[in-house]
Image (cartoon, coloured by chain):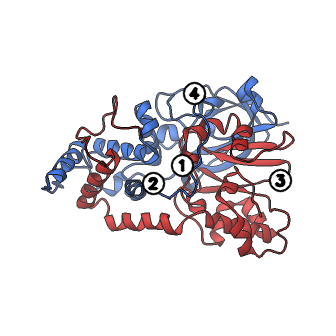
Amino acid sequence: MSGHDHDGHDHDPHHDHRAAKPWQAVRTEALESILNELGVLSSSRVDEIVAYYEDKIGQKSGARVVARAWTDPAFKARLLADGLSACAELGLGGPETEYLHVVENTPTLHNIVVCTLCSCYPWTILGLPPAWYKSSAYRSRAVREPRKVLAEMGLSLGDDVTIQVWDSVSEIRYLVLPERPAGTESLTEAELADIVTRDAMIGVARVQV
Amino acid sequence: MNGIHDMGGLHGFGPVAVEPNEPVFHARWEGRVYAITQVMDTTGLYNLDEHRHEIELMDAAAYLTDGYYGRWLFAMERILNRKGVVRRAEVDQRIAQSADGEVAPVDPADRGWPLPDERRIPWGAWRKDVEVAPKFAVGDRVRVRNHQPAGHTRLTHYVRDKVGTVTVVNAQAWVYPDTRAHNAGENLQPVYNVAFTSEEVWGDAAEPNTVVRVDLSEDYLDLEAAVA
């Protein structure tokens, strides 16, 4: 953020211009201590959740799903029919993913995911979204000029490839099933999972060998 | 509401800046705000759409500068204050006292906590024990209502009054965000995925061979032409 000017914004009457801490840090600390004191939450539970998202949840979960779909056609069929129950087979599930649609890329159809209203994202499958996914630039442009955005991010698609932009403004979350790259026939499921990236599962990149 | 949060199609935000090797949280407070909100989801104090609407009510300039989790913090503080769980003055006082090194405990009396069970609000959106009968079928042409409420909506502005094709019928009982955000009823209904051609939505600015697919509550839609 750009500094200390919060005109028109009713936060932080005690802002100290000498303090290094941003207002968000100061107010969060105070609010958490009061909530903890009142028994609305316990700070140890907050610690656990932070650690869970920092260490346990992330794109590796989604990569396992994709690698399984690439190597097990019956799993892929279940995944495309009902994303969440197929993911549950791999022990995945949790908050902010009530329903999951998995959308498959082909040589002629490319899917990308955005949420123009906030930044909805399948947390339990991909971890928390990167800053660019939450940025004003991505949210405003991905629906209007996806080809240009993708090209700027390093993925140039010909006009013969249909682009489908999924604006996930409801409670249905989306995961892109990328194309399996050529030359990966001999890789094991675990090796395949290692090459699948978060960006490919949002639809802004291809999986590269 | 028509606010800065409804960003689809806006101009002027420049290129998408990608940060290599980005941490999960960029500062300790971000992780705290995220996790505290996760706990709030389970308390029954407020629901997902109240949280979203409170963010929409931010000053537009602050929305753009306070950061993603800064918006969450703003919303949480405002809701907790309004519901008398933690008052804004108490947070201000705690900050001042922390600076002075002498923190007085808050008085737990006379506040909206603990919350009686009968006043608990479910956070999520899918009511699995309820069935709904969809009005529209895959292939139907639907026109999005020109719906412009001052309150909360999940109807993105750029598809208002546009015609698209129903491609997926999510025939589960989903809460209607526009009323739930104001605790004015769940109005359970299906959610449809509707495909719009880029030309329909963006007119002369459309990119070739591009489709925008948007999830929309049944109440946002009118039948234009039933599937043959």
Pointers 4 and 2 within a single chain = yes
Tell me the residue at 84%/44% (across/down): A161
Q: Would you call the spot at circle 2 few (<14 residues within 10 Å), some (14-19), or many (20 or more)?
A: few
Say whether marks 3 and 4 touch (CB < 8 Å). Answer: no
Q: Gap in Å between the C-alphas at discs 3 and 4?
A: 36 Å
- Label 1 in the same subunit as label 3: yes
Q: Is residue A73 above or below residue B166?
A: below
Chain letter for the red part:
A
SS label for mark 4: loop
Give the drawing colour for chain B: blue
Query: As shown in the figure, which amino acid type bears the numbered disc 2?
Result: His
Secondary structure found at label 2:
loop
Residue B221: percent from left, percent from top: 65, 33
The answer to whether residue B184 shows anywhere in this view is no
Report the residue marked by disc 1: A131
Q: Nearer the viewer, residue A90 or A27?
A: A27
CB under 8 Å between discs 4 and 2: no
Say which quarter of the image contains residue A104.
Answer: bottom right
| Residue at mark 2: chain | B
Give residue A202's position: percent from left, percent from top: 66, 52
Q: Are marks 2 and 1 in contact (CB under 8 Å)?
A: yes
As helix, strand or loop, the secondary structure at mark 1 comes to helix
Viewer-nearest of labels 3 and 4?
3
Residues packed near mark 3 inside 10 Å, few (<14), some (14 to 19) or many (20 plus): some
Q: Which residue is mark 4?
A: B147
Q: Earlier in the sequence, mark 4 or mark 2?
A: 2
Which mark, by number, is residue B26? Answer: 2
B43 relative position to B130: left or right: left
Looking at the rendered structure, the kind of residue marked 1 is: Ala
Circle 3 is placed at which residue position? A106
A88 horizontally vs A162: left or right: left
Q: Quadrant of residue A194?
A: bottom right
